[in-house]
Image (spheres, rainbow, N blue to C red):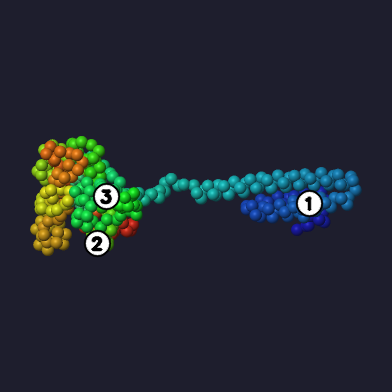
Amino acid sequence: MTEATDLPLDDSIDKLTADAIEELGGIDDLERLEQWRVAYLGRRGRLTLILRGLSQMDLEQRRAAGALGNRAKLQLEERLTQRTLEINQTLLDRAAAQDSIDVTLPGRSPVPGRLHPTTQIVREICDAFVGMGFSVVEGPEVEWDRYNFEMLNIPQGHPARDMWNTLWVDYRNQAGQQPMLMRTHTSPMQARVMESMQPPIRVVVPGKCYRYEATDPTHEWHFYQVEGLAVDEGITFANLKGTLYEFARRLFGEERRVRFRCDYFPFVEPGVDMSIDCFACQGEGNGCRVCRDSGWIEIMGAGMVHPRVLAGVGYDPEKYTGFAFGMGPERIAMLKYGIEDIRLFYANDLRFLRQF
Ligand code: 2U9
């Protein structure tokens, strides 16, 4: 292999150009391309050094060689630019090929979120009553004692207040009283509705409630409730039974039977609790764990609105009567889906939540 340097200058420039172009053809990455540029066209490049060597020549020779050299330099620079474009295009095509979407490939299906089980059951309960002409209203979670207790026939110092371990808000009014609390039930919103309008009233009130209670499998310190109220002229206990019986059938099946037993709530008189026949043992009991062998499952409380509550908002209890009811959606969901521990609802454990 003859070295360019021992050839006549013009041949050596041609040979060098040919070698350089041949070498360039074999380069397909930008890094080696740069090394090639430095090797030939760099400050200490082979062509640069030859051109620099022209200074020792006489004028005539220098002119001829100079032209040759500059043509070679231009040629190599052109080839370099072209090769750079080619390599960049290859890189682009390769990149495009890499992240080109093969539309035939199955997509990564986004994991659809879904409603929290409590939300699902609250909506199911509300829909059942909306289907019977009730409208859904929601109220504030931070409430006044007046609405949460006083207007519900639970005056200051009334023992019923101990039925609920209230979370009081650290706020004192001018009189130094502490009238603000985290609502212990959604009943205050029914009092607000009655205070704000005249009968007829048909409302269901879902919402979050709070009680300062130690949590256990059936008690959380924050939980949902769905309560309801119907006030009009001539509303009877039969209306209460008919409405709640229909509700039980809509939520737990057409074949459900219901049972009413006396119970006590300060804001209704008479007060009852309503049970459905156990859907696990068809009411037979015989050791059934769901109904603890009773054949019946208590699902809610209800009653005729206490005349003192009606009078408290300015309704004439002789003219208007009403019924009200209340239930715990988490408890209903636990019954329906066989969930053992209410704390699962708010433990944010996807293994639990994904089931719904
Ligand atoms: C007004 C008048 C009457 C709402 C009622 C119940 C019975 C009831 C329970 C739900 C789950 C308590 O926490 S719980 O165990 N509630 O059983 N609630 S009657 O009565 C009202 C409400 C507002 C103005």
Report whether residue 329 is seen: no
Q: Looking at the image, is mark 2 or mark 3 earlier in the sequence?
A: 3
Q: Quadrant of residue 74?
A: top right
Q: In this figure, which residue is indicated by the disc labeled 1?
A: 48
Q: Looking at the image, is mark 1 or mark 3 earlier in the sequence?
A: 1
Report the disc number at residue 177.
none
Packing grade of label 1 (10 A; few <14, some 14-19, many >=20) is: some
Amino acid, disc 3: Asp
Residue at image x 32%, y 58%?
347
Packing grade of label 2 (10 A; few <14, some 14-19, many >=20) is: few
Residue at image x 10%, y 53%?
261
Gap in angstroms between the C-alphas marked 1 and 2: 87 Å
Residue at image x 25%, y 47%?
147
- Provide residue 59's location: percent of width, then percent of height: 90, 46
Q: In this figure, which residue is indicated by the disc labeled 3?
A: 145
- As helix, strand or loop, the secondary structure at mark 3 comes to helix
Return the residue nearer the eye: 98 or 229.
229
Amino acid, disc 2: Pro
Residue furthest front in the image? 175
- Provide residue 140's location: percent of width, then percent of height: 30, 46
Report the disc number at residue 217.
2
Comparing marks 1 and 2, which lies closer to the viewer?
A: 2
